[in-house]
Image: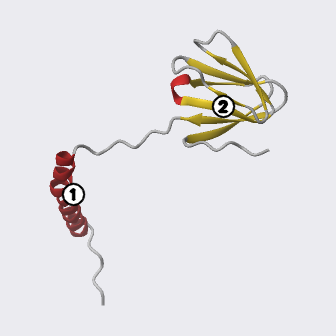
Amino acid sequence: MQSLQYPFATQDWSLGTGRALTLQASQVVAIEALSGSFWITVSGSQQDFFIAAGERLPIPCQHGEVVLEALTGAATARIAQHATAPRAVGSGFTRAVAVSLLAPLAHHAGQALRRVANWLDPLPARA
């Protein structure tokens, strides 16, 4: 079986028979059964979903929870999630201030701390 390729983050989960996994619907794009079969309940949806190995279910809503339960034996699912970009440090001006003012201060503070540490615990004099 060839797995589908996702243009976002994925995470694989293995569940035993009768074990359930609850996820926030706002974070899940789709669920693919890699092995075994699953019963999927999506809050806000009026129907339950069943998928078997090789099948994929796009999550129909972005509110509430998605509950995924293995039906027979151990089963593995691939959860496609919305990928989030890392937070930016700030606007252009804020970033410029941080780089030009705060970075040198941190460097000088580190040097000052090293001098104090050397003064408090000097290395033995070499013979």
The residue that label 1 is drawn on is 103
Which label belongs to residue 1?
none
Callout 1 secondary element: helix
- The kind of residue on which mark 2 rests is Ile
- Indicate whether 52 appears above or below 4: above
Q: Position of residue 47 (x, y in %)?
A: 68, 12
Image point (54%, 17%), residue name: 64
Which label belongs to residue 31?
2
- Indicate whether 64 appears above or below 111: above
Q: Position of residue 105 (x, y in %)?
A: 17, 57
- The kind of residue on which mark 1 rests is Ala
First in sequence, mark 2 or 1: give its number. 2
Image point (18%, 62%), residue name: 108
Q: Position of residue 38 (x, y in %)?
A: 76, 25
Label 2 to label 1: alpha-carbon separation: 44 Å
Callout 2 secondary element: strand
Badge 2, how many Cα within 10 Å: few under 14, some, many 20+?
many
Quarter where residue 48 is shown:
top right
Badge 1, how many Cα within 10 Å: few under 14, some, many 20+?
few
User: 124 left or right of 26?
Assistant: left
In the image, farthest residue toward the right? 73
Tell me, yes or no, whether the two marked residues, 2 and 1, touch with CB atoms within 8 Å: no
- Indicate whether 53 appears above or below 48: below
Q: Position of residue 78 (x, y in %)?
A: 67, 37
- Indicate whether 127 appears above or below 104: below
